[in-house]
Image (cartoon, rainbow, N blue to C red):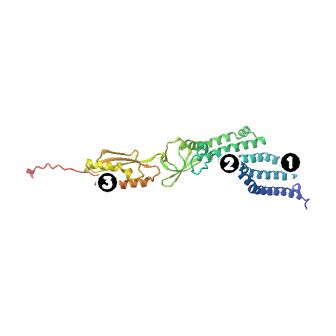
Amino acid sequence: MLDKIYYGNSVQDWGVSIIIIICALLINKLIVVLDRKIIRKITAKSNTRLDDIFFDALEKPVMSGIMLLAIWIALERLNLDHTVHEIIGKSYDILIVLNVTWFFARLVAALIEENLANKSPNKSREGRFGIDAKLLPLIKRAVLIVVWLIGVVTALHNVGITVTTLMGTLGIGGIAFALAAQDTIKNMFGGVTIFTDKTFSIGDVISFNSTEGTVVDIGLRSTRIRTYDKRLVTIPNYKLMDAVVTNISSEPGRRIVMDVGLTYDTTPEKMRKAMGLLKDMPNRVPDVRNKDLIVAFTEFADSALIIRFIYFIRKDADIFETRTKVNFEILNSFTQEGLNFAFPSQSIYIENNTDPAKC
């Protein structure tokens, strides 16, 4: 029975090839056990993290390499068609290079994480070498793209395909693809510009055209903003790069401008008293800044004497809650001092020119 022929090979030959593949699987299991039980314990005792990173990056590519070797041996010992062996040979010329590239990609990614990521407990925005922590994914992705491009080009070269030949084959299709991808490229450069210029970061409140909200994500292609009505707005990065963007979170405090109108029967002494109460607002409401406070008697309006009150709310304070406290403080203090708020009104004076003798 073992000598029975199937597809040019005996049952015994097929069985031996299958056993070779099974042995490779068992060897991979053994490698995993050795790595977890022995190698990791040895590398953990060293004074450097490089050996840990190296062996961690090496584990899976080694296992896939063993499987590739086992499959190669299993197929090469079989009596297959010459064309099949040629296909297998060219495939392995590509797969071996890609497997080595996989190892280097894992190693480079781990080294970038280890050397550029911020591992301090204070959660600073900047990692090592002064690089913004949010820029790290872009750096890692760009480096990995370069590594894989080198690997793919090398693998294609091994089977006789050069880059110039490949580009010539693409021809008009490649040009069309490049034109179609230009917006994507613009968005990617826009994302890099946002990170490098530090225009804004995740968590900042920004204003762009008619959109204002909190930045929740910055990607390679687009930036997502959560508006005040809780809607998620997605904006292409190249539009943000070319437009005027106001970073509201970067301001030292939120500027509030309000006009307080008092009735025309308010005496000069009471006007000065009202202005004094407004100037004392930082002592009454803690989140109002002392700096840049402006109180001025600015206008004789149609139905009120106008006091312009400009104040700044501290950056980390709740804007609406602070404004509410200020308005209540104005209402309470002005009421206690007998200061009357004006409302739109009109007084009509009728002159009596009637001659009493004619009545």
First in sequence, mark 3 or 1: give its number: 1
Horizontal side of residue 225 vs 5, given as left or right: left
Q: Mark 2 points at which residue?
A: 110
Q: Which amino acid, mark 2?
A: Ala
- The kind of secondary structure element at disc 3 is helix
Q: Position of residue 345 (x, y in %)?
A: 28, 52
Give the spatial CA distance, label 3 vs label 1.
100 Å
Horizontal side of residue 77 vs 333, given as left or right: right
First in sequence, mark 2 or 3: give its number: 2
- The kind of secondary structure element at disc 1 is helix
Q: Position of residue 312 (x, y in %)?
A: 41, 48
Query: Is disc 2 in contact with disc 3, using a CB cutoff of under 8 Å?
Result: no
> In the image as oriented, which residue stretches furthest toward the left?
357
Q: Which residue is at the front of the view, 342 or 1?
A: 342
- The kind of secondary structure element at disc 2 is helix
Residue 53 visible in the picture: yes
Numbered circle sitting on residue 334: 3
Numbered circle sitting on residue 135: none
Q: Where is residue 89 in the image (x, y as percent from the top left)?
A: 82, 46
Horizontal side of residue 56 vs 76, given as left or right: left
Numbered circle sitting on residue 82: 1
Horizontal side of residue 328 vs 245, given as left or right: left
Give the spatial CA distance, label 2 vs label 1.
42 Å
